[in-house]
Image (spheres, rainbow, N blue to C red):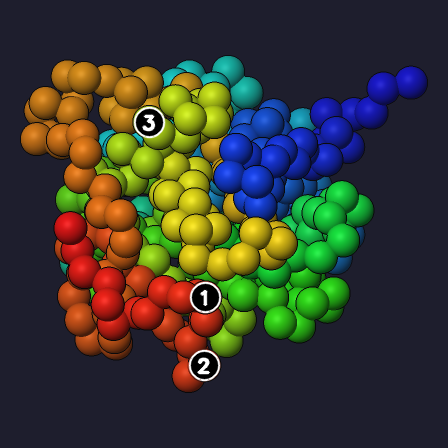
Amino acid sequence: MGNSLIDSIGNTPLVKLSQSNIYAKLELLNHYGMKDRVAKNILLQAKKDGSLKPKATIIESSSGTMALGVAMVGTALGHEVIIVTDPRIDPLTLVKLKTLGANVHIVEKMNEHGWQGARLEYLYGLFKIFPNHFWPKQYENPNNPGAYKTLANELMKELKNIDYLVGAVGSGGSLCGIASQLKRYNKNLKVIAVDSTGSVIFNQPLKSNRLQGGLGNSIKPQNVNYDIIDEVHWLNDNEAFESTLRLGEKEKIFAGNSSGSVYTVASWISKQISGDKVIVAIFPDRGDRYHNSIYSKQFWNENNLKLGIIPNNPTMVTEGDVVESWSYSNLRGDSIEYGETKHNSIHRV
Ligand SMILES: Cc1ncc(COP(=O)(O)O)c(C=O)c1O
């Protein structure tokens, strides 16, 4: 007998990339993407603890994978779902959301906290109109990181030991949730966050005109557990998009830009460390909805994007440096030992 759609979330493939010590967890092969797990865990837990009441309207702010997860699980459980998003939402996601039966509200203008801030402001307005509502609150709900216990267990079933975990950060749920579980097996696990330039998560000044989606944020979510992250890498839009094209060409994985950036960072780390160390890279979503951005020549021309701009090595920076292109910073006193590579000899090319 088959499982229900909700039961079948997770158990995604783990594939070894051509750089032999990188294992990619293909969360993009969930029904809609990585956040299917989060929607499932948050909504089922909320039903259990009574915070999601019968006939309640589920309201969430998201422009992508979380929206799809909540729409799928929420409507499958029989609830009305309202998704608040902004004009950056892509047409394919809109079609999917509407097909699943979600109501989509698009805010028109950003406020002083960017699009994220404008969406939250709109959300509070909706709460007054729908007193019987449930807000999954992916930025602070512990059941967001908690949803990744299953993913960490899936990894440990296939790999004896994991030395490095590389993942994108938006709400912080996936990287911090997976890391906290994996640290139970290896307390020396190195946790590498991947962000976009112009995102405030790791204390960079906000740039609201970022082209990258998924990772990055214009606010600092509570679900980012800074204590668990060893190092952060930032890539700019051009570098992220070129990385995504390389991922398709070299590894045959058609993915979104957060997977692309994670791929570039994981590949670089794999060159710095010995071949017997195991790196896990998390790939959150598929490339389809980026067909008219990352994968469109016209989009590259319109936005003055160029191929061949990814440096061989990122620049190491310290707290307070503003980054414009691929850079990284140690968040803890004890910096990661990268074999023979001397950090201070790294220059942008
Ligand atoms: C495509 C994509 N990549 C990465 C992330 C970041 O994941 P998290 O919110 O778990 O930090 C998100 C979050 O929405 C996403 O949609």
Kindly identify the amino acid type of the residue bearing the numbered disc 3.
Answer: Leu
Q: Position of residue 101 (x, y in %)?
A: 53, 21
What residue did someone put label 1 on? 339
Kindly identify the amino acid type of the residue bearing the numbered disc 2.
Answer: Asp
Q: In percent of the image, x 42 and y 76: which residue is there?
A: 335
Distance of label 2 from label 3 (alpha carbons): 34 Å
Instruction: Note whether ligand 1 is within 8 Å of mark 2.
Output: no
Q: Residues within 10 Å of mark 3 (few under 14, many from 20)?
A: many
Which mark, residue 318? none
Q: Position of residue 56 (x, y in %)?
A: 61, 42
| Label total for image | 3
In this view, the residue in front, 234 or 219, is 234
Q: Relative to residue 269, is residue 305 drawn left or right?
A: left
Which element type, helix, strand or loop, lies under badge 2?
loop
What residue did someone put label 2 on? 334
Q: First in sequence, mark 2 or 1: give its number.
A: 2
Which element type, helix, strand or loop, lies under badge 3?
helix
Which element type, helix, strand or loop, lies under badge 1?
loop
Asked if the residue at tag 1 contacts the one at tag 3, i.e. Cβ–Cβ closer than 8 Å, the answer is no
Q: Position of residue 209 (x, y in %)?
A: 16, 44
Distance of label 2 from label 1 (alpha carbons): 14 Å
Instruction: Note whether ligand 1 is within 8 Å of mark 3.
Output: no
Which mark, residue 245? 3
Q: First in sequence, mark 3 or 1: give its number.
A: 3
Kindly identify the amino acid type of the residue bearing the numbered disc 1.
Answer: Gly
Asked if the residue at tag 3 contacts the one at tag 2, i.e. Cβ–Cβ closer than 8 Å, the answer is no
Query: In the figure, 332 relative to 340: above or below?
Result: below
Question: Which of labels 3 and 1 is toward the front?
Answer: 1
Q: In percent of the image, x 9 and y 24: which residue is there?
A: 302
Q: Relative to residue 251, is residue 56 drawn left or right?
A: right
Query: In the figure, 137 relative to 205: above or below?
Result: above
Residue sticking out furthest to the front? 340
